[in-house]
Amino acid sequence: MYLSQSEEKILRGDRGWALAKAMKLIVTLGELGDAEKLVSIRKAQISGVSYKTVGDSNLELLEMLAKEKIKTKINATLNPAGMDLDRWEEMGIPQFFAKKQLRICNAYEKLGIKRTCTCTPYLSGNKPSFGEMVGFSESSAIAYVNSVLGAKTNRHGGLDALSAALIGKVPLMGYLLHENRRANLFVNVKFKPKNEADYAALGYFIGKSTQADDVPVFNGLANATPDNLKLLAAASAASGAIALFHVLGVTPEIKRIEKGGITRRLSTIEVTSEVIKSIYDELSANIKPNLIAIGCPHCSLKEIKTIAYMLAGRMIREKMKFWVFTSPQVFSKAEKKGYINMIKTSGGDVFKHTCMVVAPIEEMGFECVLTNSAKASFYIPRLTKNRCQAGLHSLLDCVRLATNK
Amino acid sequence: MEFEAKVIQGWMNEIIGKILITRSKLSFLGDIDADTGEIVGWDIDIKGKIIYDKILIFPGSRGSTVGSNVLYGLSRKGLAPKLIATCRAEPITISGAIFGEIPMISNLSEAIFNHFKNDDFGSAKIIDGKAYIKQIIKDK
């Protein structure tokens, strides 16, 4: 792989061990991916933030890096933390957890990474444009910006996205190259999605049914909204490793792909309503829920508005919590519009910076969560060591189950 | 039966260990208990087994990009596999293995799933920059 003189110098250690280590990782990834060179990026998204998921060893690594006085020069944003950074006490987060979480966020901040703490940077001040090459981690955001925005990123891990942010470069390979963005799998959707959770179930099925470098193209989803595709993307990147998909009549690269031949080699999957039902069966809970959690990925302003109006005139049952999760930017907008107050009036709450997947909900008395996110349904039992169950339901069903009406 | 592979994170001498093999894709976040190294994903055929000290063979990763951080953490806690062996190498697993200094090989043929069994013992060596992995004792 070609390296410029300044890249060689960083690799040699001329600018310290930390940047050398970051450069070594990026160069190794490039060599393994047959990249011809590195390319500059202006945006990165860094996962590996919640103390619950990364623990003490990553905290120590980050504090060690933070001591080196190196700072990213690009727009780099953080994934959700394990708590609302301002209202963690109200959430019921244990104090020892909060202390560690704040240390992680402080270390990232010293490295120049903004503590926006969201999995939807594209709704929160870090939105890649069509065709722009970026270095994103956060599996759901990768699938969303590649597919829905037509930006270009590989499926970076938290550590390599951090390295890419620090040196401002990624290897030119994989999904950054046009030939790897063509579809190879035709997904014929033979059922009509009734609600947003059906899109999540569809994504979950596709993730399960595909290999890592598969690029599906969906037929039959012409009415999908960006919020629907956000849930689909997240689920397909949880049960599987989907980094990019196309939707006929909807996503921005579809025309170019049609012109250049839609596929590499085409195989077909049909998705029927029976298949979707089997996914709901797999992602179901068998005890009474005590938390309804919406916002995996973080809610858009439109989704918060829908929730606010659905809850209007209803009250959340006693012994039940109804929590909505979003980014700090979307939270501020929703607050100005009065949606946050509407949700609170009904007995619900809205938290920022975090979500039900990465907050320590099993330490907070929750035993069963209902959600419209297949991604969250996949991770909650796994990350709580089965101390908390999860079930996939539409938002409307969640509201009905949580309220008296 | 011996398989050739690409070296991702190298090592000295020969690695000998018990084989833990699955055809399932793995997410190091969620499918593996970060405190014990136990496989906890309910749809994985080797659920309940421990990855610590094993030669862990799987086709490729799925799920969370935090997998790299979890792998690094497993290594720091002394819970890492002796060797990670995959058919496809993705940045998530590669960066965890490199930061955690966990030996890793990739580009294995899928045929390995027909020949290697759980609890067999395996051996892995690097010769002239290429990795070779084989069973040495078959489980009875």
Image (tube, grey):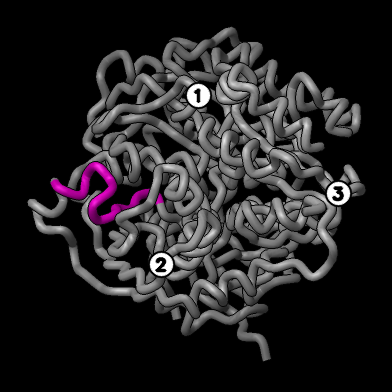
Q: Chain of mark 2?
A: A
Relative to B114, is A393 on the left or the right? Answer: right
Residue A192, label in figure: 2
Q: Which residue is mark 3?
A: A317
Residue A124, label in figure: 1
For the C terminus of chain A, the image quarter is: bottom right
**Type of amino acid under label 2:** Lys
Q: Chain of mark 1?
A: A
**Type of amino acid under label 3:** Arg
Q: Secondary structure at mark 1?
A: loop
Q: Secondary structure at mark 2?
A: loop
**A29 in relation to A163, above or below:** below
What crowding class fits label 3: few (fewer than 14 Cα within 10 Å), some (14-19), or many (20 or more)?
A: some
**Type of amino acid under label 1:** Ser
Q: Nearer the viewer, residue A244 or A86?
A: A86
Relative to B11, is B30 on the left or the right? Answer: right
Mark 2 and mark 1: span between their CA atoms? 31 Å
Residue A58's spot in the image, x, y percent? 69, 32
